[in-house]
Image: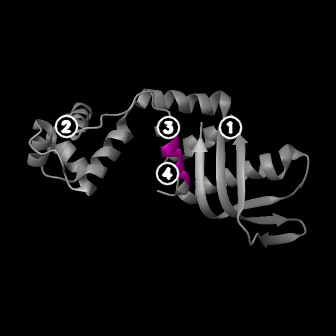
Amino acid sequence: MGDIDDALERAGRETFTREPPKTLKGQIGYLMRRLGITRAVAAEVGVSRRSVERYLKGERKRPPRAIADRVDDAVRARWQPRVRQRARSQAAGATGITIETRARFGYSAPAGTTDDGRYRRLTVHLPPQYARRLFDARDAGAGDAQLRHIVAEGLQEIYFKDGGRRADGLEVELNDIDYFDVSF
C-alpha cells in the first residue's frame, strides 16, 4: 500500500457512524460473525484457532500488542461497509474529495522541465470525476504510481492550471510525498 491508498482507507474509516467494538472479546465476536469460522479469523489475525477460541470465551483478555493491533485493523477494515460505500458514492457522484498534502512536484512545460526543490503544502478540493477515477483505480488494484498520476492530474487541472485559466501546456508530476490526507 502506498501513501494515497492509505489515505483513502483512513478517509473511509472516518465516515463511521458508530465506533467499532473496543474489547477483544467483542472484536473477535464481530470477526466471527463476518468471517464465519475460527480458522478464517485465526488466519486473518495470525494466531492459532485455539487462541481465537480463548479470546472469544474471554479466557484471554490481553494479547500481545502486535496481535491486538492486527485484530483492531481487521475489525476496522470490515466495519460498516455500507456506510463507507455510501460516502464513497456521494464523493464520486456529487461532492468530490479534499486532498491535503505536503509534497514535491515536478513540472514539464513548453519552456522545459524542472523538479521543484521545495515541499509545497496544498489543500485542494477535487471534483467528483477525480474521486471516481481514484476509487475505480484503487478497486481495480492500481499501484501507487497510477494513483499518484491521477492525483497529480487533478492538482494540475484544478490548482496549477486554475481550471484552464493559466499555465497552458503545464504537466505536473507528484514526486516526493511527505504526508497525504484525503477527506470526503
Q: Amino acid at mark 4?
A: Asp
**Callout 2: few (<14), some (14-19), or many (20+) C-alpha neighbours within 10 Å?**
many
Q: CA distance from mark 2 to mark 4?
A: 27 Å
As rendered, which of 41 and 68 lies closer to the eye?
68
Spatial CA span between label 1 and label 3: 21 Å
Pair 2/4: label in front: 2
Relative to 42, does residue 94 appear above or below in the rendering?
Answer: above
Tag nearer the camera, 1 or 3: 3
Q: Secondary structure at mark 3?
A: loop
Residue 7 magenta: yes
Residue at 18% x, 47% y is: 42
Q: Amino acid at mark 1?
A: Gln
C-alpha span from label 3 to label 4: 13 Å
Q: Which residue is mark 4?
A: 6
Q: What element does badge 2 sit on?
A: helix
Is residue 93 left or right of 171 when viewed as pictured?
left
Q: Earlier in the sequence, mark 2 or mark 1?
A: 2
Give the residue drawn at x 61%, y 38%.
Answer: 132
Label disc, if present, on residue 129 of the rendered structure: 1
Task: Return the disc, 3 or 2, that comes first in the chain's sequence.
Answer: 3
Question: Mark 2 = which residue?
Answer: 25
| Residue at the disc numbered 3 | 14
